[in-house]
Image (tube, rainbow, N blue to C red):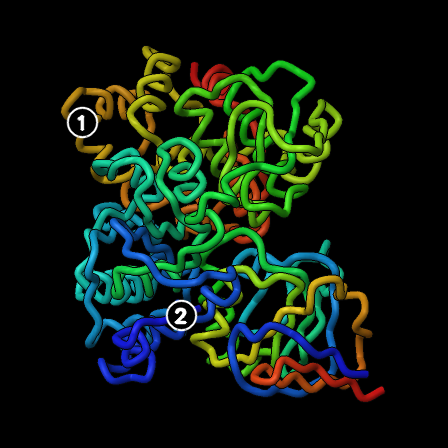
Amino acid sequence: MIISGCPRIVGGKGTGPAVVTNQPINFLAMVDPKLGKITDSKHELHDVPLAGTVLVFPSAVGSSVGAYVIYSMREYGTAPSAIVCSRTDITTASGCAIANIPLVDLPRGVSVTGVKTGSMLSVDADSGRITAKI
Amino acid sequence: MELTRDEQEALKGEHGEALASAYRILAAIGEATGAEKLVPIKWAHVSGVNYNTIGDAGLKFLESFSKDARVTVRTTVNPMGYDRSKPAGISDRFQEKQEVIASSYERLGVTPSFTCTPYEVFDIPEKGSAVSFAESNAAVFANSLLGLKTNKESALSALASAVTGKAPLSDLRADEARNPKVEIKSDYTFQNELDYGLVGYFAGKVVRDSCVSLSVAMPSMMQAKALSAGVGTSGSCGMFRIGSGGNERISFGRKEAEEIMAELDTSEDGDLVALGSPQLGMGELELLSELVRGKKFTKRCMIFCSRAIHTQASKRGLAGELEKSGAEFMCDSCTCLTPYVSHEKYDSVISNSVKGAYYLNNSNKVKVALKDMRTIAKEYAR
């Protein structure tokens, strides 16, 4: 499966198993960057390791400091290989820009649930393409 | 997004590594928000000051970034983790780390305001001015009540705007996004700041647009602060308009309020009264001092406010009166993620802030008894 026409937010390429949620993420309140996991037990990605994955979620919410949490994940080696959002917010965009994490939006009309958790994804942000090997 | 030749050179690193990083951030957020160009801003307000929020990675980033970057517009900063004049209970390690972060910001040339309510402390630019505010309650307040134009910036994007003096012309800086599509209509009469905090938190959760219209009674200053903080905490919405507007209507009733209380009001009682998320202003200090005049707090009570407000309150005798009632002022810091209010020290905290309750529960890992200020004064001052 190929999803093309994904707007590039931060350039680069990244590959990994897809970790998909339809729930927004408050990086400051929910993510422990040392563990590379969501620690909020109410979130459906609770305790799922994010390192080396392609993280697919709608957008970040809440604290503006979340950008530093994304940067910290890179510094601690727990960051996703690439991130895909429905509609990237400023916190995720700026965090990925400083952490050099490739980041694209899904094309309008494509929902995050169109991507299956666990499938191997390659994100090429520069050409706006997500390739899934099933 | 189109960049000028000068901006492109800076992005390529021709004006130094720090400016290149700043333009990388601006380019990314410009793409994310569909901006056509960058515009000059009059004021940046930066978050990411508290060591408990940015950690060692953030500390190192700022140390390196501040070596050759300087702010080019008025830049104010969010609270840090503690009040330097009250180090009791704060570990030496935390104090050292916090000092390194504060020094990096000072080297960048910021005004060391350490406040999350810059709108209560500084002169406000003329209406319609573009600014770049990271702290979410301040961004929502600036858009909704001051007629300033900012997106709901991140700590890093506001920092990028502080050193470049520019921000993308998009979203809430453009006029179109400032028209709400959804109206939230309350079907009960609001009594206090807690009701406003709850409807704000609800609005942020259910509305994905940048601006929401709220059909509720016009809030007072204290209520408007609670509302802005509520909106900023739960969602991506960066502005509200009081009144009706939009094509879609969502009802906010007692049931919706109770659902949020079930999530955030996690304790019946607490060991500490913590007020100030956002930091308290003069109006709130006046009200509190009237409510507890001649009485003493029956629990430890911490008031978080900016140094500037504390100085004003001291001159007017307000700070002294509140201290007579047993309240302690913690300047330059706030309820959220301060080591003053850790789960090692307290099991549960009494607060009137929906935003405070969210972070106390989720980040400080303490339970919260959520009550409005009048109720707190009645129950915990005798």
The crowd level at tag 1 (other Cα within 10 Å; few <14, some 14-19, many 20+) is some
Report the side of B183 relative to B359 (left or right): right
Q: Which residue is mark 1?
A: B314
Q: Identify the residue shown where x is 31% and y is 51%.
A: B45
Q: Identify the residue shown where x is 41% and y is 44%.
A: B139
**Above or below, comparing residue A67 to residue B236 in the picture:** below
Amino acid at circle 2: Glu
Q: Position of residue B83 (x, y in %)?
A: 27, 47
**Element class at badge 2:** loop
Report the side of B174 relative to B191 (left or right): left
Q: Which residue is mark 2?
A: B2
What chain does mark 2 sit on? B
Residue A126 is at least partly visible in this image: yes
What chain does mark 1 sit on? B
Amino acid at circle 1: Ser
Q: Position of residue B253 (x, y in %)?
A: 71, 23
Q: Position of residue B286 (x, y in %)?
A: 31, 18
The N terminus of chain B lies in quadrant: bottom left
Residue B91 is at least partly visible in this image: no
For the residues labelled 2 and 1, say whether their Cβ atoms are less than 8 Å apart: no
Q: Identify the residue shown where x is 71% and y is 72%.
A: A48
Distance between mark 2 and mark 1 Cα atoms: 50 Å
Quadrant of residue A134 in the image? bottom right
Q: Nearer the viewer, residue B173 or A44?
A: B173
Q: Are marks 2 and 1 on the same chain?
A: yes
Name the N-terminal-most of marks 2 and 1.
2
Q: Position of residue B152 (x, y in %)?
A: 46, 50
Report the side of B92 relative to A59 (left or right): left
The C terminus of chain B lies in quadrant: top left
Q: Nearer the viewer, residue A65 or A40?
A: A65
